[in-house]
Amino acid sequence: MEVIKSLFCVAGFAITAMPAIAEDYVLSTEKTSLIINAQAGRPAYIQYYGSRLAGNAAEQIYAAGQAYWHNSYPTFGIHSGGEKALAVTQADGSMTADLEVVSSALSSTADGELLTVNLRDKVYPLTVTQYFKAYRGTDVITTYTAISNTGKKPLVLHRFASAYIPVKRGDNYVTHTHGTWGAESMLEEEYITNGQKRFANKEGLRNAFGDNASVMVSLNGRATEESGYVIGGVLAWSGNYDIRLNASNTYLDLIAGINEETSHYSLGRNDTLTTPEFAMTYSTEGKGGVSRAFHRWARSYKLCHGSRSRDILLNSWEGVYFNVNQEGMDQMMEDMAGMGGELFVMDDGWFGKKYPRNGGETSLGDWVVCKEKLPGGIEGLTASAAKHGIRFGIWIEPEMTNTKSELFEKHPDWVLSQSNRPLSKGRGGTQVILDLTNPEVQDFVFGVVDNLLTRHPEIAYIKWDANAGIMNYSSRYLPADRQSHLYIDYHLGLGKVLKRIRAKYPDVVMQACASGGGRVNYGLLPYFDEFWTSDDTDALQRIYMQWGVSQFYPAIAMASHVSADRNHQTGRRLPLKFRFDVAMSGRLGMEIQPKNMSDADKTFARRAIAAYKGIRPIVQQGDLYRLVSPYEKRGTAALMYATPEKDKAVLFVYKTEHFINQNIPVIRLSGVDPSKTYRITDLTPADEKKTLGISGKTISGRLLKDAGLSLPLNGEYASIALQLEAVD
Ligand code: GLA
C-alpha cells in the first residue's frame, strides 16, 4: 500500500472549472488506487477509483481526461438536483448545506493508511469528516463520515450517506443477491439502464432478508468470474440500509449508507453521528477477483477470529427441535464425538422456569435452565461434553422476549411498544422485541451472555438468534422528539452490547443467526465468527444460496450443515455424499438426529469429517474460484478453493440436474498454477474401496486450467470432491 500526496499544476487541461493548483491524495492498495482532491476552501472531489496507478498518478488521470471532479460528499441546498449524500435542516430551519475543505491529513494506523478530510459548512455550525481507509495487505478501501453539530441548537439530518462513488458510465451490469426466509442470498445480475436502481432494507433487524447490503458493478460489459472490470461494494451495517445506483448517460453514481427513510436524525450540541463503513474493491479479474478481495479483507480485519480454524459441530435443532433433555443431548454428543465432531450446540428449548420453553410461544428472556428437562443443569451438559471429548455451545435469542415470560411480566416497558396501541406480536403469537436503545436493556442483554459465561466458562460457542423484524415502532426510552432514531439507535445499542461481550469474552465463538440468513452482513461480522446461512438445509438449494453468499462473504463464516435424508424444508431426498460435499464447501457442521442414521451412514460421515479436517485450512483460509455457476443451468455446478501459493486446492462438483445423454461441462480449474503438477485424491468416495479413476493420478496445472477435467458425474445428485496437492 502506498499513499502519495502530490501538489502539482493542472492548469491547461480540458476541465476549465478545476483549480490551478490541486491537492491530490492517492490512496493505493496493491492493485487499486483512489484519488481524492482536497484543497482548503473548496469542496472535496473524488477524482478516480480503479486500477493502481504508480508514480505521478494524479497527473496521469488528468492527462487522460479521467478525473471525475465529482463532489465527494454532495449536499442538498445550493445545487439541489441529483442524488445527495447529505441533507440537513439547520437550527434556523434552512434546508441548505454547503461544505468546504478545512484541512486534510494522512496517517498510518495499525491496519492501514487513513485519509481524513475535514469539511465544514460555509455558514452554519456543521462539520463533516470524511474518512478513506486503505487496509494493509488487502485490495479494499473503505469510506465513512462523522457528521457533527458544532452549534448550540439542534439540527436534523435527513440524508447521511456513508459513500458517494461515481463510476464512469459504460456497459454496466449489477450483481447482487436477493432472498427471503429459506431462500436467502439468491444471485441476481442485470443490465443497468439509465435511471435509479435501489437496494434497500426496511425490516429493522434482519437486514439480509430481501437484498443483501452488497453489490458488484461491472464497467465494461457482463463480467465473467475471471475477466472484466468490476467494482464491488459492501456496507458494514446491521440495520436498514440503502444502496442506490443512479445511472445517467455519463456517470453511474453509487450512494450507500443507512436507510434514512423514517429515520431522520437530530444532532444536539456537539453531537456526532458516525456513518457505517462502506468497503469497496476494484478488480480487473472479474467477479472472482472482487470476491477474493472481500474474503481476504474479511478474514484479516472484519470477521471475528478470521484466521482461526472452525470446529465441526452438530446442532440439535433439526434433530430434536424443542425436545431437549439431558439424555437426548448426551446421546447426540456421543454420536457426534464418535463421528469425529468437535463441538455440540444445544439449540432452542432448554430454558424457562415459570414457562418452560416447549414452542415459540413462551420464555424468551427467561434464560434459566428448565429443570424438568435438564435436572443436571448446564453443568450436566458441559460434563457430558467433557466426557465425550468435545466442546459445548448453546442457543440464545437475547434481543427478544415473549409476552408469556417472567421477563415481560416484570418489565413490560422494556419492549418496543406504544402505550396507547395494542401490541403487535411475532413468532408464536407472543414474541416481541426488547428496546435496545435503552441502556438498562443493553445491560440486561449483556447480562444474558455474561451470566452464562461466568457461571459456565466451559461454554465455547453461542448461537445468537433474532427471529423478528421490528414491530411496534416505538421506544418507551427515547424521548418524543427522538423516536425517529429508533432504527439506528437500536443497532448502535446492539453494537455496544456486542463490544462489551467481546471485551470480556474475546475467545467465545459466536454465530449470528436471524431466522436463518437474516443477518449476513458486515456490520455484525466483527463480533461474530460466522452466520447461519439459511434455515433451509436442503443441499441442492444450498448450492445456489452458498454461491450467492460467496460473492461477498468468505466460506469460513458460512455455516453449512448436513441434514436429514428427507430434508425438513423441501422434503427432498439426497445422497449423504452429496449433502456432505455441499456442506464441506463451507464451515462444515451437521443438523441431524444421528441416532436415526444407519451404521453405514455414520461410517461415511466419519470419513467425510476426517477428510474435511484435512482440507479445512484450504476451504476456510483459501482463495475461492467459482468455476461453473449453478445459475447458468448447465446441470452442473463447480467451485474450488486454493491456497495463495496454489500448492493445495480442493474442487467440489455437483450435479444439479439429471437427464439422459446430458452434456456435462468441462471443468476448467482457474485456481491452479499452470507451472505446477498436482496429485489428485478422491476425498469422499461413497465406497471407500471404489475411488474415482482420477484418484492418485498426477496432472499438470496447465492441463487442469486449459483443457480442464471431464468428470464422471453419473446419476442423479452425483457429486465429487477432489483434493489437489502440488508435487515436485
Ligand atoms: C430460528 C433459527 C433456527 C433455530 C430456531 C430455534 O428459526 O434460524 O436455526 O435456531 O430459530 O427456534
Image (cartoon, grey):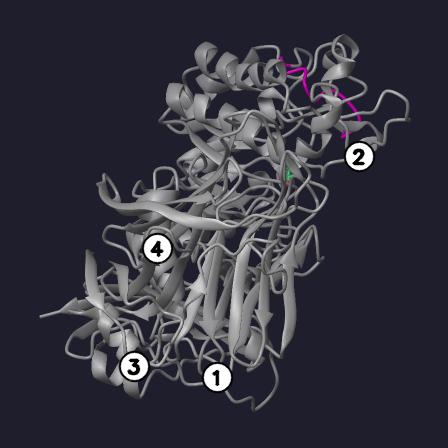
Mark before the other along the chain sequence, 3 or 2: 3
Mark before the other along the chain sequence, 1 or 4: 4
Residue at mark 4? 141
Q: Secondary structure at mark 2?
A: loop
Q: Is mark 2 within 8 Å of ligand 1?
A: no
Magenta includes 559?
A: no
Specify the amino acid type for callout 1: Gly
Where is residue 195 shown, x and y percent of the image? Answer: 65, 73
Q: Secondary structure at mark 3?
A: loop
Query: Tag on residue 426?
Result: 2
Q: How far apart are labels 2 and 4 at the CA level? A: 40 Å
Mark before the other along the chain sequence, 2 or 4: 4
**Residue at x-position 28% and y-position 55%:** 138
Specify the amino acid type for callout 3: Ala
Q: Residue furthest left?
A: 728
Residue at mark 1? 221
Residue 299 appears in the figure: yes
Q: Residues within 10 Å of mark 3 (few under 14, many from 20)?
A: few
**Residue at x-position 21% and y-position 74%:** 673
Depth check, mark 1 against mark 4: the one in front is: 4
Q: How far apart are labels 3 and 2 at the CA level? A: 57 Å
Depth check, mark 3 against mark 1: the one in front is: 3
Q: Is mark 3 within 8 Å of ligand 1?
A: no
Asked whether disc 3 touches disc 4, contact meaning CB atoms under 8 Å apart, the reply is no
> Which picture quadrant has residue 156?
top right
Q: Quadrant of ligand 1?
A: top right
Mark before the other along the chain sequence, 2 or 1: 1
Specify the amino acid type for callout 4: Ile
Residue stretch in magenta: 358-369
Query: Tag on residue 64?
Result: 3
Q: How far apart are labels 2 and 1 at the CA level? A: 44 Å
